[in-house]
Structure formats: C-alpha cells, structure tokens
Image (cartoon, rainbow, N blue to C red):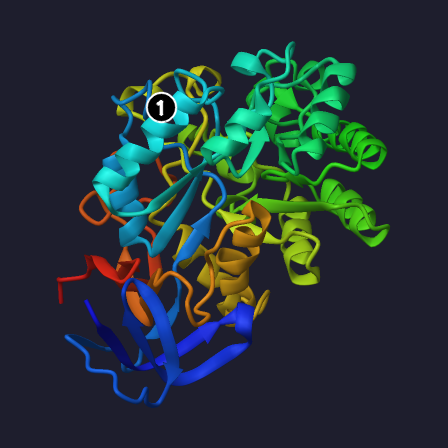
Amino acid sequence: MRLRITNGRVIDPANAIDGVQDVFIADGRIQAIGSDFQGFTAEREIDATGLIVCPGLVDLCARLREPGQEHKGTIASETFAAASAGITTLCCPPDTDPVIDTPAVIELIRNRAEAAGYARVVPLGALTEGLAGESLSAMAALKAAGCAGVSNALHPVTNAHVLRCAMEYAATHGLTVFLNPEDPWLRNKGCMHEGAVSTRLGLPAIPESAETAAVARDLMLIEQTGVRAHFCRLSTARAVRMVARARYEGLPVSADVSAHHLYLTEMDVADFNSQCHVTPPLRTQRDRDGLRAGLARGAVAAICSDHQPHEPDAKLAPFSATEPGISSLDTLLPLSLRLVDEDVLTLSEVLACLTHKPAQILGIEAGTLSSGAPADICIFDPQRYWELTESTLLSRGRNTPFMGWEFKGRVTHTLLAGKIVYELTDS
C-alpha cells in the first residue's frame, strides 16, 4: 500500500529530524519526508495532526516464551502486544527451550514471527552449548542463520577461561557478546537488593558487588580480547560509572537499562510485592538516580522492556519462591516518556534510546526514517492519558506492578514494512 502520513511531528533522532512534515511510504519502505513528493499518489492517508511520528521502537530484550513455555505466552501473542506499544523489532534472548544454539531453532522463531506478522524478531544465539558454560557454541553457523549476537542470558559462565575463549571466538566472527553481569556466588540464592529493606523483611539478598564484580571481570576480558560487548540491564550506579570509564578509555562496550529500573526501587518490595521480584533486583533510590544520570550522559545507550510474561500462579508463592520478571511491553514507551516530563531527557533523546541506538547495538537496519529504510513506524499521541488495566494490557502476561497506573502517551498506529499492524480504535 502507498501511504502518506500527514501533518505529524516527525522525530527521527538518527537523522536529526524534528518538525511537522509528511512521510511518504511505498513498497514497504520510506520514500521521502517533507511537505511534498512529486508524482506520489497515496492509496491511504493517515492524519497525524497533533501526533508524534517516529521510527518503530527496537526492544533489546523480550522473552516471547516460545518455544518451550507457551503457557506463559507465544510469539503471536507477544508480538501483537509489542505492535500495540509501537515496538516493531524485538530481540529474543537464547534461553528458550530448546536453547537457541542451532540454526533450526532460529529458523523456527523467525518463521513463526513472520507468520504472525506483527513485529520483527531478532534472536541472540547461545554463547555456549546449551548455555551450560562449558563448550563454545557454533557461532559461525548461528551468525549465518541470522543471529545479531551471542549471549549466555541469565546463565553465568563461571569459568573465566571459557568466557575468554568465547569472547575471542565471537570477535573473530564480528559478533557482539551480550553480557548479563552477575557473580553467582555473590548472588547466593538472593531475591532482592541487599540493604535495610531486605534485612527488615528477612529476605535473602543480592549485594551490589554481585553486579560490579562481574562487570569488572568482564571489562578486563573485553580489553584483552577486543570483542565488541554489550552489558544488559545494569541496575547499579557504580556499574554505570565503570562502563562509562571503559567507554572513555576506548573499549567497544555499550549498556542498556530496563524501563522499570528507572522508576522502581527496593522500597517497592517493602510489602513483599512479588510483582516487583525481578532480575537484576530493584536497587536503591541512589542507584535509580545513577541509571538516569547514565542515560543523560550517554553512558547507557538504550532503554529496553526486559519483558517476561508469566501465568498468574508464577507470582502467587511467597516472594522468594515466585518467578522473577515483569510483563512490560505495554509500558515501555509511556514509562520512557515520563523521563521527558521529569526533565531527565528530551523527547528526541528518549526516542533515540528506543530506536536507532538499540538498532546500532544489534547491527540491524532499523530505528530510522531514512529514505529507503524499512517503513517501520510508530505514531503516538503524546498528550493522551490512559490507565493500565486488564483490558488495556494486551500481553498474555498480567504480571506487572504498574497495574492501575495512569500513563500519558498512547500509540495510535504501528506500521511494519509499510503495513498497518496496529490501529487504536477506541475513543
């Protein structure tokens, strides 16, 4: 379909575009941005007066639960939820069942995502076979099959020699290593941040050093091997400062943070709220402010959802026995937009953290409205208020501490390769 999006405020941080213009789309790609495109006849026009038109969001971490845990969610259900939230590209960690350590699993995921047709799914391959941390995976075959990088997800590689060899092997194939920094011995079966709140609640706790010690080890190996690396879901201010220093010294590293870590703290666990049981744990208010400062300085490049949908029973046990994670696709954009109202980032900076910066980390063609780029577009009303309820939450997972919150900023249209895959219909 030949589309023309008219009168919207077009914001494309990758190209420093911010102004009221029209967007012209044909053959699934951006043809031009401007007031007119000679000879263009649209089959449909979308009036975006008063709305923001930006590239489709790129989410660096979303567990879609398929294959292996379809009772929690499926690729079809979760990519539809993503489309309703303006997300057009999702990065899937390798800890599925079976693990993404063979081209066959990659093909399965991509085929089901294409069949659903709501969003692109970019898988990460396993860093080690079966995520066991012992033998290196077939990285060359995984890259050829379409993996954007390799990771051991939440399974630690405890043997530093194995991790070094894996980094060297990834470097030879030009693959980015995605690291979830946490020392398993310092974590020691903890379930929340170690501090006054964990002591009062009597819950097993995870110290700040579980993250910072792992970041320190990984940075030394990155420096030695020269691999391009990305730190996933940092949660402490000190870890952000360590990554910032490494970037200043020229190491090829980047980092992201989840949207919920920019708002929630250990205090939100104070009544044993299992909806706030996440990995890494919610830290102190000082850490939360440090994550925000890292975004403002550019030390943290991207904001992700860290989407982990669960069935209701997963959150009904005592806090330490519940499964960690938040269903967070629906809240990624509105939580990020709050940073603008709170003067942490400008609107263009927020959208950069959700579009072209994560796309650059993945090394994919996305997150921009450049001429010839895929027409993956998010259109949202920045002034529209709405409440997160059972009816407005479209993910199959209902596990969120934000239920009942009022948000500002609602997606009205999402386009994938020029096709409208979501359109808000209520008044």
Residue 395, can we see it? no
Q: Quadrant of the N terminus?
A: bottom left
Residue 2 position, x and y percent, is: 21, 71
How many numbered tags mark residues here?
Answer: 1
Q: Residue at x 60, y 30 (%)?
A: 197
Q: Is residue 18 left or right of residue 389?
A: right
Q: Is residue 83 left or right of residue 89?
A: left
Residue 164 position, x and y percent, is: 77, 23
**Front-most of 255 and 337?**
255
Q: Residue at x 40, y 48 (%)?
A: 89
Q: Which residue is mark 1?
A: 315
Q: Residue at x 46, y 20 (%)?
A: 102
Residue 419, can we see it? yes
Q: Is 154 above or below relative to 63?
A: above
> Are there few (<14), some (14-19), or many (20+) residues within 10 Å of tag 1?
many
Q: Secondary structure at mark 1?
A: helix
Q: Is residue 372 left or right of residue 362?
A: left
**Front-most of 404 and 86?**
86
**Front-most of 4 and 259?**
4
Q: The residue under label 1 is which amino acid type?
A: Lys
Q: Residue at x 19, y 61 (%)?
A: 423
Q: Quadrant of the C terminus?
A: bottom left
Q: Place residue 325 in its image quadrant.
A: top left
Residue 277 position, x and y percent, is: 47, 29
Q: Is 357 above or below relative to 330?
A: below
**Front-most of 184 and 173?**
173
Residue 335 position, x and y percent, is: 44, 55
